[in-house]
Image (spheres, rainbow, N blue to C red):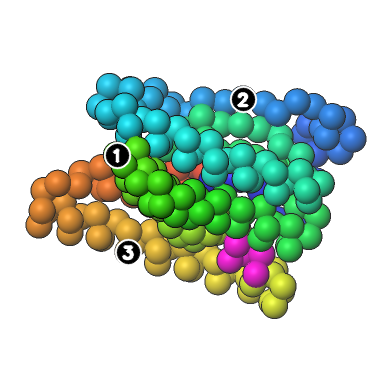
Amino acid sequence: GNDLSPHNSSNIEKYFSHKGGRGKNLKKRPSFYINPFAPAGLFLLFFAFGKNERAAVLSSVTVHELSHLVAAYLAGQKCRSVTLTSFGINLGFNPPKTYINEIAIAAAGPFSSLLYAFAGYKYGGAFGYEVFMFSALFGIMNLIPLPSFDGYHIIYGALSLLFKESTTQKAVYTVSLICLFIVWMISVYILFYSGINFVLLLFSSYVFAVAVIKKDLPFL
């Protein structure tokens, strides 16, 4: 996933003024952060996953995030932060110059994940199967229009090309809430009727909690 800076100009100006000015901020090296839930994710990765699964997860996340970086570089955007989370790495970029840039940078990750999944499928074998499963899931998951996910920025950028900002914000917030509700309900259904996917429930709860804490869903 990636985190493009706030879209409205007032928030953008506050961000730069807090950092000490536009020129100074652009020259700074990216800041590195560790999410409080990251150690739990790393523990599961190294102690609950097998060798092929672990390699597939690490390579899939790397391909996904490198694609964001390459797209951002080509669009002239700077990476301002790198956050280690329990589900991978979140890259924060400076405010996009255009909505086309925002869409391209956000779409690069899921697109590369799906290509890598196809490559894993063609490669075959145990490792290829794990790459196919995880990278495909990772790419599709990031297309969900939830706050801080790639799908959110893709939809926001696309709608911003067609509608004014206030209309776009209301539409995207509504879609995000509906999608979050659907993911949560599916996770609860799977848990109670199969008893095998508690991880999905934890994931949707985590996303909801982060969205509320960060106030990415301001209507709550």
Q: Is residue 77 above or below residue 44?
A: below
The residue nearer to you, when weighing 10 against 68, is 68
Magenta segment boundaries in residue numbering: 154-158
Q: Is residue 189 above or below residue 25?
A: below
Find residue 182 and name its label: 3
Task: Identify the image quadrant of residue 14.
Answer: top right
Q: Is residue 78 visible?
A: yes
Sequence-earlier tag: 1 or 2: 2
The amino acid on which the numbered mark 2 sits, given as a three-letter code, is Phe
Q: Residue furthest bottom?
A: 162
Find residue 32 and name its label: 2
Q: Residue at x 40, y 67 (%)?
A: 178
Tell me if label 3 and label 2 are in contact, CB under 8 Å: no
Task: For mark 2, give the secondary structure.
Answer: strand
Badge 1: few (under 14), some or many (20 or more) residues near its Cα, within 10 Å? few
Magenta stretch, main secondary structure, is helix
Q: State yes or no: residue 18 in magenta.
A: no
Q: State yes or no: residue 156 in magenta.
A: yes
Q: Which residue is mark 1?
A: 126
Sequence-earlier tag: 3 or 1: 1
The amino acid on which the numbered mark 1 sits, given as a three-letter code, is Ala
Residue 197, horizontal then vertical, whole percent = 20, 47
Q: Residue at x 40, y 36 (%)?
A: 57
Q: Is residue 189 above or below residue 158?
A: above
Distance in Å between CA atoms under marks 3 and 2: 32 Å
Residue 66, horizontal then vertical, whole percent = 61, 39
